[in-house]
Image: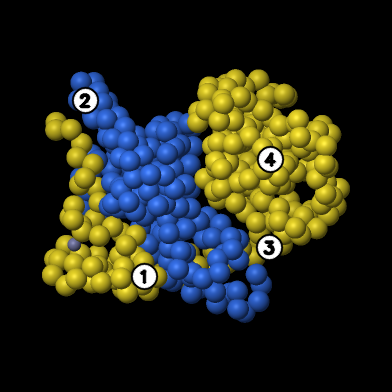
Chain colours: A blue, B yellow
Amino acid sequence: MAGDDSVKEVADLFRQHGPRVYRRALKLLGHPADAEEATQDIFLKAMKGLARFQGKSQLTTWLYEITTHHCLNHLRDLRRRGELHEAHLSPPAEDAAPRAFDLALLRRLLARADEREAQAAIYVFVDGMSHDEAAALLQVSRRTVGNLVERFAAAARAAASESEGGRR
Amino acid sequence: MSPPDLTTLRAGGPDCPSDLALDRLHLGELDAAQRAPLELHLKDCALCAPRMQERVQGFQALPQVDERALLASLRTRLAAQAQARPAWWRFLVPVAAATAAALLAVVLVPRTDDLDTAALREKGALALHVFRLRGEKAEEAVSGERFGPGDRLRFVVDLPSDGYAAVLGVEQSGALYTAWPTEGVAQTFRAAGRHIELPGAVALDGSRGVEQLHLVHCAKPADPPACVSQGTGQKPRCPAGCILTSFELDKRP
Ligand SMILES: [Zn+2]
């Protein structure tokens, strides 16, 4: 880990994959400082596990999995500690695509959803994966992905009508 | 207010390729048959052109991120980690044979690793790192990975504050068991810090299904932790003041 080769390897890997890991972490966590910290944590994990990869054709997929898991855990920890505040709920400034309400609600829902449902929801709704793509990552059938995201969407609808009634 | 439209969260339109597909295309991870339909789509999709552009630009498209500072910090942490982690896996003794009936077999590992790593420790969020032992090597596992009977695990934790630690498992059946402290470990109090190794290793039994491991961290002694199973896939209910973080073991055949 200390040699010149590994220093270069870290730099190359970071340049190639860092921007996409950061972007995803920012979208999921909503807070630039958290996204930077998460990006580092994710790379630390990746560097440790890299030896397992013969070819690197699956590396991107694997980083998606690590990032998903890491960000979900982070959202849950924040929720448990009562720290899922507005800072994490407001959308990142440069991320113009999704409506603010959706990202804020998404983080709240992800923090409390069943782990598999949350993972499936991230892959399908945030990353735009087909059910087939998500099924391959989650190692379940396409049908199961359909069920998982439907349950998540139902919870989202319920939460939206709740907040409409109570205006938190 | 209209119900949340989750389909608006993604980049691109409903018929556009996923972020993963574009990432893999950009990095040259796809074969010709996988590339062809994507390249066809990209030829005349106005929504996807900026998505690909963003990928080509890398950190340049993220002016708010100081790439050099982030990389420097990552290197520092990697170096600290390399120094902080003693090679405890070299001293493992073989797993005892007569453990078929036990949920978990306990392997006592000689404590050869009492290095002074305190200087390298820093506070962070609660984290449970699970290492799978393979021969002489230990590899950090990722939550949700596949595990098999006989896999041997060791735990390394990050603790945000001083307190009492335990690792509890919830089987597919919902049954709660203690994975750590392993037999012979008397002291479960740990000072706050990162990369704290929990002594001993556990070997997974032959039960199948998806199991969760929960690192439980309590301010007061909860020894054995007064936690109650809430069923499979759920975090156990623990006394007030305890915080938990989870790790999933996929033990399906
Ligand atoms: Zn498109």
- Residue B55 versus residue A141 in the image, above or below: below
Give the Cα separation between the discs numbered 2 and 4.
Answer: 44 Å
Query: Which of the 4 image quadrants contains residue B77?
Result: bottom right
Residue closer to the observer: A18 or B142: B142
| Disc number for residue B82 | 3
- Comparing labels 3 and 1, the label whose residue is closer to the camera: 1
Q: Amino acid at mark 3?
A: Ala
The answer to whether any part of residue B90 appears in the image is: yes
Res B188 quadrant in image? top right
- Disc 4, ligand 1: is the CB inside 8 Å? no
- Disc 2 designates what residue? A161
- Real-space CA distance between mark 3 and mark 2, rounded to the nearest whole angstrom: 50 Å
Name the residue furthest front: B253
Q: Are marks 1 and 2 on the same chain?
A: no
Q: Chain of mark 3?
A: B
Secondary element type, mark 2: helix
Residue type highlighted by circle 1: Leu
> Residue placed at 44% from the left, 48% from the top?
A139
- Quadrant of the frame with the N terminus of chain A: bottom right
Image quarter hosting the C terminus of chain A: top left
Q: Give the class, few, some or many, for how many residues have Cα within 10 Å of label 3's Cα (few <14, many ≥20).
A: some
Question: Which comes before the other along the chain, label 4 or label 3?
Answer: 3
Q: Nearer the viewer, mark 1 or mark 2?
A: 1
Between marks 1 and 2, how big is the CA–CA gap?
42 Å
User: Which amino acid is tagged 4?
Assistant: Leu
Front residue of this view, candidates B94 and A126: B94
Q: Position of residue B71 (x, y in %)?
A: 50, 67
Q: How many angstroms separate mark 3 from mark 1 (CA)? A: 34 Å
Q: Position of residue B64 (x, y in %)?
A: 34, 62
